[in-house]
Image (tube, grey):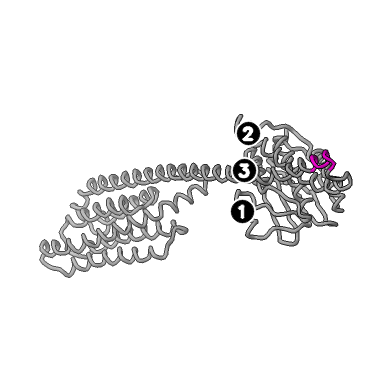
């Protein structure tokens, strides 16, 4: 009884941890109280208290020690908690077996005690079903060995049916409990996922409104104002041309973002269709380098394209184009005058990595952690170039929907390397 995904199984164990500990606490308290109460009935039945006290008190001590050990566990060590519970209840049963084999308690005490302990320990203490099954087999075999070879007792042998029935009831209860917990865990995960999705959509909506109302409107407003002044002869052509380069750069950034946003919006409205085709990566990189050739020359940035010829990949063309265009644009944007940009690749068994490195301003560790989320804040380029802060988030969305991924390695002041990982699915 496992989740196939290891991370999901690990998350389930952490989820079940507090329930396991609570139920073991309840079992410990109930068992200790029951042992103390039964101690008096044992004395009345057998007429002496030493043997009864030794058995009941030792059982209570075993349970309490097991409970104390659980304080050394945490939700990061759920397997350790299961081991402590398993060892405690198993030791409890064996302590009863040992005591019954060396004392003169009445014949009915051992099978009744074992049946009760088996049922309560595996159904109430929070043991996983697989551990409960192991526990049942060990106890069952030990019980048979005890009355058959160590202390032959016909009455104990006659109680094997009762012990078996009670044990199977306990196993069934353990199975039902774990199934119920796993179902609840799946439901909780679904609710958490939906909540995260809603929060993400709300955050994206707020971010979009902020970008549309400020970052996109600003460059267009400047361009309109300059054209209006030129039309009304309020500014000379020389002054206009002086400001043209800066406005042009802002408009290009606006255009790139609008292109990303339209592609993303289309995928949401019409449904995302991952149409893939075979492409030559070097050819696509060369096409985009041609677009940014002038921007790189203006900042005297040397660009090295180390992608080998005929490096083929089967991927969504729009996504790959947008991803490379954004990464090259960012690399030039954040690289100071006289810097360097490199495009490399790395082949792995199942993936192709395309790496865009620069000698730019780099990224601080605190920003790097949330770089591809909506929490990231746009920072100016090396020449004060502006951005929207949404580009990398949208790239991650595009790539992951097509089975790809994006990551970044960076050090403040020493540059950054962005890596696009594409499935190596060549026709």
> What residue is shown at x 40% (from left), y 44% (from top)?
184
State whether residue 78 is above or below residue 225.
Answer: below
Q: Secondary structure at mark 3?
A: helix
Residue hosting label 3:
208
Question: Which residue is drawn at the image coordinates 38% and 43% (left, top)?
Answer: 179
- Label 3, residues with CA under 10 Å away: few <14, some 14-19, many ≥20: some
Magenta stretch: helix, strand or loop mostly = helix
User: Which segment is the magenta one?
Assistant: 226-233
* Marks 3 and 1, how far apart at CA: 18 Å
Tell me where residue 160 appears, x and y as whole percent. 24, 48
Mark 1 lies on a secondary structure that is loop
Mark positioned earlier in the residue sequence (3 or 2)? 3
Give the numbered dot on residue 370: 1
Task: Check disc 2 and report its element: helix, strand or loop.
Answer: helix
Q: Residue furthest bottom?
A: 50
Q: Is residue 13 shown left or right of residue 416?
A: left
Residue at (83% x, 41% y) in the render: 230
Is residue 157 highlighted in magenta?
A: no
Give whichever of discs 1 and 2 has the lower sequence position.
2
Q: Residues within 10 Å of mark 1 (few under 14, many from 20)?
A: few
Res 211 seen here: yes
- Which residue is tagged 2? 267
Quadrant where the N terminus is found in the figure: top left
Numbered badge on residue 113? none
Front tag of 3 and 2: 3
Marks 3 and 2, Cα distance to the nearest angstrom?
A: 16 Å
């Amino acid at each position: 009884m496992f989740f196939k995904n290891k991370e999901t199984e690990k998350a389930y164990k952490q989820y079940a941890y507090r329930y396991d500990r609570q139920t073991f606490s309840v079992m410990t308290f109930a068992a200790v109280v029951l042992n103390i109460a039964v101690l008096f009935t044992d004395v009345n039945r057998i007429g002496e208290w030493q043997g009864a006290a030794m058995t009941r008190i030792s059982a209570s001590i075993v349970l309490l020690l097991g409970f104390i050990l659980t304080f050394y566990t945490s939700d990061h060590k759920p397997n350790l908690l299961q081991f402590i519970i398993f060892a405690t209840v198993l030791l409890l049963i064996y302590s009863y077996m040992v005591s019954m084999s060396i004392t003169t308690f009445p014949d009915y005490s051992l099978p009744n005690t074992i049946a009760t302990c088996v049922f309560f320990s595996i159904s109430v203490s929070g043991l996983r079903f697989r551990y409960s099954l192991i526990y049942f087999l060990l106890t069952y075999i030990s019980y048979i060995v005890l009355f058959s070879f160590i202390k032959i007792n016909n009455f104990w042998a006659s109680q094997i049916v009762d012990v078996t029935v009670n044990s199977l009831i306990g196993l069934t209860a353990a199975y039902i409990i774990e199934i119920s917990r796993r179902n609840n865990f799946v439901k909780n995960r679904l609710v958490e996922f939906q909540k995260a999705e809603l929060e993400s959509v709300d955050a994206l909506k707020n971010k979009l409104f902020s970008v549309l109302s400020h970052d996109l409107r600003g460059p267009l407003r400047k361009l309109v104002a300059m054209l209006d002044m030129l039309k009304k002869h309020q500014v000379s052509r020389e002054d206009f041309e002086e400001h043209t380069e800066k406005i042009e750069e802002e408009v290009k950034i606006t255009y790139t973002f609008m292109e990303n946003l339209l592609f993303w919006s289309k995928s949401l409205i019409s449904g995302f269709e991952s149409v893939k085709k075979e492409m030559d990566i070097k050819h696509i990189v060369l096409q985009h380098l041609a677009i940014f050739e002038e921007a790189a020359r203006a900042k005297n940035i040397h660009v090295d394209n180390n992608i080998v010829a005929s490096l083929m990949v089967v991927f969504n063309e729009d996504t790959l184009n947008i991803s490379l265009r954004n990464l090259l644009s960012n690399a030039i944007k954040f690289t100071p005058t006289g810097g360097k940009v490199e495009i490399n690749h790395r082949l792995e068994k199942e993936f192709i990595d395309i790496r865009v490195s620069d000698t730019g301003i780099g990224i601080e560790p605190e920003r790097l952690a949330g770089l591809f989320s909506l929490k990231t804040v746009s920072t100016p380029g090396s020449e004060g170039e502006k951005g929207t802060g949404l580009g990398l988030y949208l790239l991650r969305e595009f790539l992951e929907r097509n089975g790809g991924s994006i990551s970044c390695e960076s050090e403040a002041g020493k540059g950054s390397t962005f890596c696009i990982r594409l499935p190596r699915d060549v026709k």
